[in-house]
Each structure stands twice: as C-alpha cells, then as structure tokens.
Amino acid sequence: MKTTKLLLTSLLITMGLNAKPSDLNITENLDTNIKRGTTIGHYAKPGAPIDMSYETKKVDINEVADVNITLTTHVRYGDMNVELNFDDKLEQVSKISEKLIFQLTPNQRTYTINLKVKSTENGLFYIRLLTSIGKDKGSQMRAFAVPVYIGENPKPKTNGHQIQKVMGGENLSISKAVETIEEIEE
C-alpha cells in the first residue's frame, strides 16, 4: 500500500511539473495592454535551433510602441543572421538595421532586439524575422512573426484580399521564405 502511494505521488508530482498552460503562446496584461508571446516549449518544424519571445505594448495611432524581442539558442559557436521585415504602414522609429548578425558565444544564450515602431493607421501589424544559423553544410533557418497592435480595435490588414482558410478553418499566413537545394554527387 505504501509503495503504491509512493509511486502514485511521484507520478502526480512529475506530471504537475511537466504541465504547461494551453494558452502560453500569447498573454495580455489588461492593465497596461502589454502583449507577450513565446515559442519556447511549443512545437516547431525542423530548422534553426532558435526560439523567440517578445513583449509589445498596444498603443494609439502615431504613438511609438516598444517591441522587445529575445532570441534564444543553445548553439555555442557561429553566427546568427536575422532579417527584419515590417508590414506596410508600420514605420520603424529606431535606428536598427534590418539585417543583423549576432556572433554566438558559449557564455551567452539570449540575444535581444529592441525596436520602436509606429503607424498612422489602426491595425494589427507584424514584424517578421527570418533567422538562420550557418553551418559547414548549409544553414538552418526559422521564421517568426511579432504582432504590433495600433489604435482601437486593431484588426489584421488584408490589402483588400480575403484571408484564405484551410479545410480545418485555420487562417493561411504568407511569409517570406528562402529555399536552398543541394545537388548530391554520387
């Protein structure tokens, strides 16, 4: 009886430690309109071993929004290349290059990008990141999108096109991608 209780207790503790809230991707603090999101601990297609977390504040039209992005990797050597792409009508106020290179070191796992953006229109805009870590035999890539909320009742801009949906009802998102093809000689 004691053995069964001991095993059951240890099993429940282990399950409790591994449990994650289902709505971890995006959270909002209603008092300050701060939005937070992360890819850490969520499924990712095979690609660059990079995770991303962000924090942004919903602002009014023509008000500057701080966007804080943290990239995390366990890779210890090499370069991490980041290409930033801003939606139309979303203006970058900060003086940060749209192509960044971080030199990876064994002592550092996180790399931050602090941006300031604004818009003259209401809407839900995105900052897209295309990240890659170079390797001897090509590079590994991963794409991210950070939402920026501007004005009252922000909705995604669709450029007059209807958003397409897959059979399961999910919206399709179009992102910039780079494809590499290697020819293998035998």
Image (cartoon, rainbow, N blue to C red):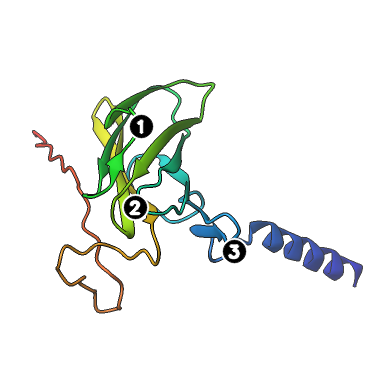
The residues tagged by marks 2 and 3 sit, at their Cα atoms, a distance apart of 21 Å
- The mark that comes first in sequence, 3 or 1, is 3
Q: Secondary structure at mark 3?
A: loop
Question: Which callout, 1 or 2, points to the residue nearer the camera?
Answer: 1
Where does label 1 land, which residue? 94
Where does label 2 land, which residue? 45
Look at 29% across and 51% down and name the residue there: 120
- Residue 74 rendering spot, x and y as whole percentages: 48, 33
The answer to which of 94 and 178 lies nearer the viewer is 94
Where does label 3 land, which residue? 21
Look at 32% across and 59% down and name the residue there: 122
Look at 28% across and 42% down and name the residue there: 91
Say whether residue 183 is left or right of residue 134.
left
The residues tagged by marks 1 and 2 sit, at their Cα atoms, a distance apart of 31 Å
- The mark that comes first in sequence, 1 or 2, is 2
Question: Which callout, 3 or 1, points to the residue nearer the camera?
Answer: 1
